[in-house]
Image (spheres, grey):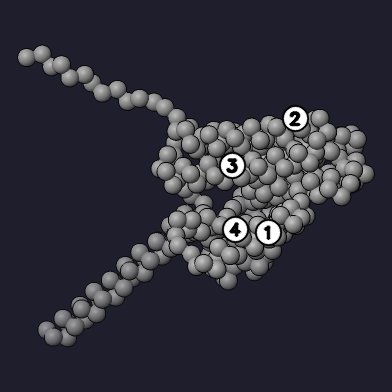
Amino acid sequence: MQNLSKPTIKTRGIYLLPNLMTTAGLFSGFYAVIASMNGHFEASAIAVFVAMLFDGLDGRLARLTNTQSAFGAEYDSMADMVSFGMAPALIAYNWGLSELGKIGWLAAFIYCAGAALRLARFNTQVGVADKRFFQGLASPAAAALIAGSVWLGQGYGVSGHDIGILVALVTAVAGLLMVSNFRYHSFKEVDWRGKVNFLVILLVVAVFVVISVEPALILCLLFYLYALSGPVVTIRSVRKLKVSHVLGDDDETDDSDGKASSAEGSPTSHARDNRDSDNKESAEEKEDTGDKASLDKLKS
């Protein structure tokens, strides 16, 4: 009898909802570049914050709806490079760096290169690094430093070219913070699907009200404080600050509280802890065996 059943073909496709959010974030970043080229700096700064909103939604929606994919992860990384790498660098250059000559475009390049390196390092550490902390300033937060400064300056009628040196300093430092080893809280341990007290909802409403009073000033201050929190957290967590705590590869030893660990929750520290526990168990087993042998000898 002829088998009429046809082999099942696995259809390939792209999940719509999370990638729709990623596309919206990419569009916002591209619009920010165009707006800055046309001299609409306030609109370009706001577009970067809108891109941050969509960037925060796409990953969480993918996890909530179980629609994660390798394509979505790569697409999100490319969109982040446009929205939080190229866009802030060009906004800063068009607003306050173009009249500085080489210093201006080099500061913008430092930021752009820092964003690219930060995203590449993040992609290679997925599933390995401690999820509670970012290694280096996240690219959306660095973009918020640039966009918030431009938005605040435009709101108070400050021309970026009048403070070009300061703009170059902020842009370059933001780029360097992205490739640093400073530890920043990621807030990923927050359970967004869990239940909270009613007071928490009231606090959220209060936060929105405070931000809406002076959004440029409040958001700019918040992200500047967050950028400063990384060095403060890192310096307070180590006994002696080393170069490896700031830049370069992490050492396997850390002076924090006299304990050996390169980064809290890192695979190296877990492996070392497992080896120590195994050695301790073997030593205890040998001791028990020796005690039993001594007792048997005494009995005989």
Q: Residue at x 17, y 86 (%)?
A: 298
Which numbered circle lies on residue 185?
A: 4
Q: Quadrant of the N terminus?
A: top left
Element assignment for label 3: helix
Q: Residue at x 11, y 84 (%)?
A: 300
The span from disc 1 to disc 2 (Cα, nearest Å) is 30 Å
Q: Amino acid at mark 1?
A: Val
| Pair 1/4: label in front | 1
Which numbered circle lies on residue 34?
A: 2
Work out whether mark 1 precedes mark 3 in sequence or the reverse, and give the earlier one: 3
Can residue 225 be seen in this snapshot?
A: yes
The location of residue 161, given as percent across then percent down, is 90, 41
Work out whether mark 4 precedes mark 2 in sequence or the reverse, and give the earlier one: 2
Location of mark 1 (residue): 209
Contact? badges 3 and 2 (CB < 8 Å)? no
Location of mark 3 (residue): 54
Which quadrant holds residue 278? bottom left
The span from disc 4 to disc 2 (Cα, nearest Å) is 32 Å
Element assignment for label 4: strand
The location of residue 292, given as percent across then percent down, is 20, 78
Q: Residues within 10 Å of mark 2 (few under 14, many from 20)?
A: some
The location of residue 203, given as percent across then percent down, is 60, 65
